């Protein structure tokens, strides 16, 4: 069932979201300072291609407050725009009963789009 959900996801918006993540990641990697943000965007893009069956957990890290600082910078650099895209697609999918699982997935990814540092995908 996860495979069917993922195939439907890719056809109805997942590919567009993944392309947004990949293009944003490439744009962020143009500078040395943006490389960590670009790498994080690439990881989120891979999750956006095949999200059903994956789980997002808090990562045990010894980075201290670095994750918080990176999340604040991420929020202003691109997190808001990706969040708005997920919210828009989520609301669009919630119009139909069949689209509710896909809308819920967009809302789950929207939460991750605001603060991706300190999280891992399992």
Image (cartoon, rainbow, N blue to C red):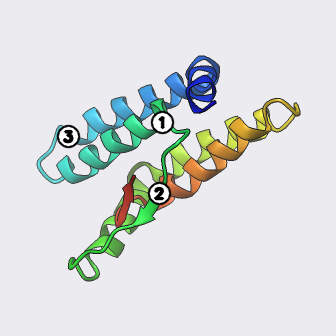
What residue is disc 2 on? 56
Binning the other alpha carbons within 10 Å of mark 2 as few (below 14), some (14 to 19) or many (20 upward) gives some
Front: mark 1 or 3: 1
**Residue 121's spot in the image, x, y percent?**
39, 52
Callout 3: helix, strand or loop? loop
Residue 33, by quadrant, is bottom left
Of the numbered discs 1 and 3, the one sitting upstream in the chain is 3
Q: Residue at x 55, y 26 (%)?
A: 3
Q: Label 3, label 2: how many angstroms apart (C-alpha)?
A: 24 Å
Task: Residue at the far left: name it.
Answer: 32
Front: mark 3 or 2: 2
User: Is residue 14 placed above or below 81 in the rendered structure?
Assistant: above
Q: Residue at x 57, y 57 (%)?
A: 111
Residue 68, by quadrant, is bottom left
Residue 115, by quadrant, is bottom left
Q: Which mark is residue 29?
A: 3
Quadrant (top left/top right/bottom left/bottom right) for the N terminus: top right
Task: Residue at the far top: name it.
Answer: 11
Q: Are the two marked residues, 3 and 2, in contact with CB atoms closer than 8 angstroms?
A: no
Of the numbered discs 3 and 2, the one sitting upstream in the chain is 3
Left or right: residue 32 compared with residue 73: left
Q: Are the two marked residues, 1 and 3, in contact with CB atoms closer than 8 angstroms?
A: no
Q: Label 1, label 2: how many angstroms apart (C-alpha)?
A: 12 Å
What residue is disc 1 on? 48
Q: Looking at this view, is 20 or 44 the one in front?
A: 44
Q: Residue at x 43, y 40 (%)?
A: 47
User: Is residue 116 placed above or below 81 in the rendered structure?
Assistant: below
Of the numbered discs 1 and 2, the one sitting upstream in the chain is 1
Q: Looking at this view, is 7 or 33 the one in front?
A: 7
């Amino acid at each position: 069932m996860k495979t069917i959900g993922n195939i439907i996801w890719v056809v109805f918006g997942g590919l567009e979201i993944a392309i947004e993540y990949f293009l944003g990641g490439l744009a962020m990697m143009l500078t040395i300072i943006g490389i960590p943000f670009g790498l994080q965007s690439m990881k989120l893009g891979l999750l956006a291609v095949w999200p059903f069956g994956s789980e997002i957990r808090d990562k045990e890290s010894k980075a201290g407050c670095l994750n918080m600082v990176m999340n604040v910078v991420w929020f202003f650099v691109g997190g808001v725009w990706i969040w708005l895209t997920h919210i828009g697609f989520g609301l669009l999918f919630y119009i139909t009963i069949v689209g509710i699982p896909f809308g819920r997935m967009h809302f789950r990814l929207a939460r991750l789009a605001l603060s991706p540092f300190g999280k891992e995908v399992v």
